[in-house]
Image (cartoon, rainbow, N blue to C red):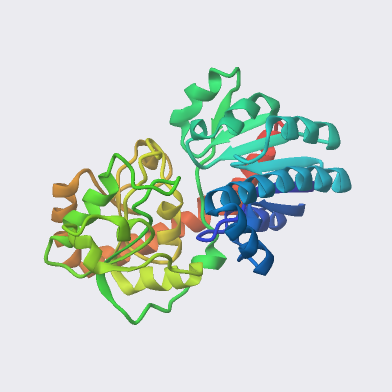
Amino acid sequence: MRVLLIGPAWDTGQWVEYCAAGLVGIGHDVVMHRYSAGLDRPAGPWARLQRRLVGADRFHMERVLGVLRRDNLDVLKVAAQHRPELTVVLKGEVLLPETIERIGHLTDGPMVHWSGDDPTWFPNIVAAAHLYDRFFLADPSYAQDIEARNVTAQFLPHAADPSIWVGDDAGSDTVDIIFVGDARHNMGHLPEDRYRVDIVEAIAQADVSLAVWGRGWEKLEANYKVGSVHRGLTLLPAAAVARAYRGAKISLNVHHAQMREAPNMRTFEIPSAGAFQLTDYKTRMADLFDVGTELAVYKDSDDLLTLIDRYLGDPQARHDIAVAGRRRVERDHTYEVRMRQLVEAALGK
């Protein structure tokens, strides 16, 4: 089919590209549009002059609104040009409900939405939910919020692209534990609930070597020891993250508060890299992995520290879990598998 795939341009991940590769891998012709890409472009001389003339705050808001306007118009232009037989929107928080409605008139097939975040954070997503033929959630706990809009939501878990993460080379900077993820809220500020920060801080206080990558850690107060093991704001590209995972004895996963029942992307990417994963437990994990055999889980910081001590002393267990986890992801949790599930549901098969 002709598929129009719309999603965010992220500096730390390639969700749109992963889904596009999955769709191509199962035989579809894909046109990809990434929104918000204009926000990453550096300001040129004219833009810098404008910023001085109107002030930084007004310049920033006008730039954001300008990119939003262009994204909505560009999506309509692409839809009109290609007349897709299936339209897939990933997140889509910048797309106005009016834009989604208009796409429905410009295309020749169903429109589906896949939300990897808490959709209730984004008014445009909630307001447009009823305009889609299918609505998928990476965490099914938000189905009740969407059903209040007369929309039936389906669970579609995250996945991994093995071609991006697989490898045998490990980073030279070997540590006991690595964590790659932000301390900050998705909106940029430090969250009120510092569960993730507290978990990583507990490890920083222990007698192990720890490396942390991500944004927000540099904003923590000076009394947080985790600041001393913070390596940088980003670790890119994904191949570099994979090497770092393989170079650590334990790859830690601490879910953001928005993932209440289901696993995040990292849950699938760590084993895909061939690394051993120790993650906080989510109730939907048992439907996707053999817990204890394909990934190791902890319940709280005390349990985590006990398991760290156990697994640091048992390299064979780490190896066996890493191998089994990779095998499960490659069989059941690739983007080709997810896109096949999405397409079949969209077409009512």
**172 left or right, relative to 176:** right
**116 left or right, relative to 319:** right
Q: Is residue 120 visible?
A: yes
Where residue 328 appears, x then y in whole percent? Answer: 45, 54
Where residue 112 appears, x then y in whole percent? Answer: 67, 36
- 207 and 52: which one is in front? 52
**346 left or right, relative to 320:** right
Identified at 37% across, 50% down, the residue is: 184
- Can you say which quadrant of the picture contains the C terminus? top right
Where residue 233 appears, x then y in whole percent? Answer: 40, 65
- 321 and 142: which one is in front? 142
Tell me: residue 133, above or below residue 340: above
Count of marks placed on residues:
0
Residue farthest to the bottom, as pictured: 172
Identified at 40% across, 52% down, the residue is: 267
Where, by quadrant of the figure, is residue 334 drawn?
bottom right
Where residue 11 appears, x then y in whole percent? Answer: 54, 61
Where, by quadrant of the figure, is residue 219 drawn?
bottom left
Identified at 51% across, 58% down, the residue is: 330
Identified at 47% across, 55% down, the residue is: 329
- 14 and 298: which one is in front? 14
